[in-house]
């Protein structure tokens, strides 16, 4: 669902459900736990950003942060938080944008790569997740773009 939240802000909300109708536990495998690929949280909904997100321009206001006071890729990568932000400055115009990533069902581990740039709602983090028979996995995410 796309929502205008004012003249200089808009949000995209993405909700999905996976219901296990198999009659047995459903194992949602994970690269890190299954194959030993440490730091491989390429799961869930992903955002691939433009080149503008790469440069912090030597400004402390620009960069990646997560709830709980985490700052920079090293602290945000894999951190359990309900939300994280990517503040950027656009190359050509020098305008600034805040991109707020939220998991509306609570804290999850975040997957961030500032040199690519990539952010993902990594719903199972570092471990394989089991969805019991008859259970439903609900993912409810919001992405908000606003001017800084």
Image (tube, rainbow, N blue to C red):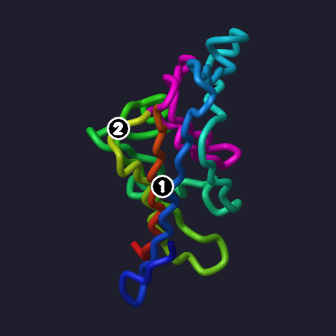
Would you call the spot at circle 1 few (<14 residues within 10 Å), some (14-19), or many (20 or more)? many
Q: Is residue 3 above or below residue 134?
A: below
Q: Are marks 1 and 2 in contact (CB under 8 Å)?
A: no
> Looking at the picture, does residue 64 appear above or below residue 38?
below
Q: Which mark is residue 86?
A: 1
Q: Position of residue 141 (x, y in %)?
A: 46, 54
| 103 or 49: nearer the viewer | 103
On screen, residue 52 versus residue 105, left or right, reads right
Q: Residues within 10 Å of mark 2 (few under 14, many from 20)?
A: some
- Judge whether residue 121 is colored magenta: yes
- Dot label at residue 107: 2
Q: Position of residue 77 (x, y in %)?
A: 50, 32
Q: Residue at x 61, y 29 (%)?
A: 41
Q: What residue sits 63% from the left and 36% below the top? A: 43
- Spot the residue most to the front: 23
Residue 118 % position (x, y): 64, 47
Q: Is residue 74 above or below residue 18?
A: above
Residue 5 placement: quadrant: bottom left
Q: Residue furthest left?
A: 68
31 drawn magenta: no
User: Magenta residues, as a range?
Assistant: 109-134
- The quarter holding residue 148 reads bottom left
Q: Position of residue 122 (x, y in %)?
A: 54, 36
- Badge 1 marks a residue whose secondary structure is strand
**Foreground pick, 72 / 125:** 125
Residue located at (66% from left, 49% from top): 117
Indicate the secondary structure of the residue bearing disc 2. loop
Disc 1 to disc 2, C-alpha distance: 17 Å
Q: Please indicate whether residue 30 sits to the left or right of residue 129 in the image.
A: right
């Amino acid at each position: 669902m796309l929502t205008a939240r004012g003249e200089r802000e808009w949000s995209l909300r993405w909700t999905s459900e996976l219901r296990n109708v198999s009659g047995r536990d459903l194992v949602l495998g994970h690269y890190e736990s299954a194959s030993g690929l440490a730091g491989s949280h390429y799961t869930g909904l992903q955002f691939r950003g433009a080149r503008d997100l790469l440069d912090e321009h030597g400004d402390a206001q620009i960069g990646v942060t997560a709830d709980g006071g985490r700052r920079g890729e090293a602290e945000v990568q894999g951190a359990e938080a309900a939300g994280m932000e990517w503040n950027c400055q656009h190359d050509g115009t020098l305008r600034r944008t805040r991109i707020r990533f939220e998991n509306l069902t609570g804290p999850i581990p975040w997957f961030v790569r500032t040199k690519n740039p990539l952010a993902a709602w990594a719903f199972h983090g570092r471990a394989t997740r089991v969805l019991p028979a008859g259970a439903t996995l609900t993912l409810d995410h919001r992405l908000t773009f606003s001017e800084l």
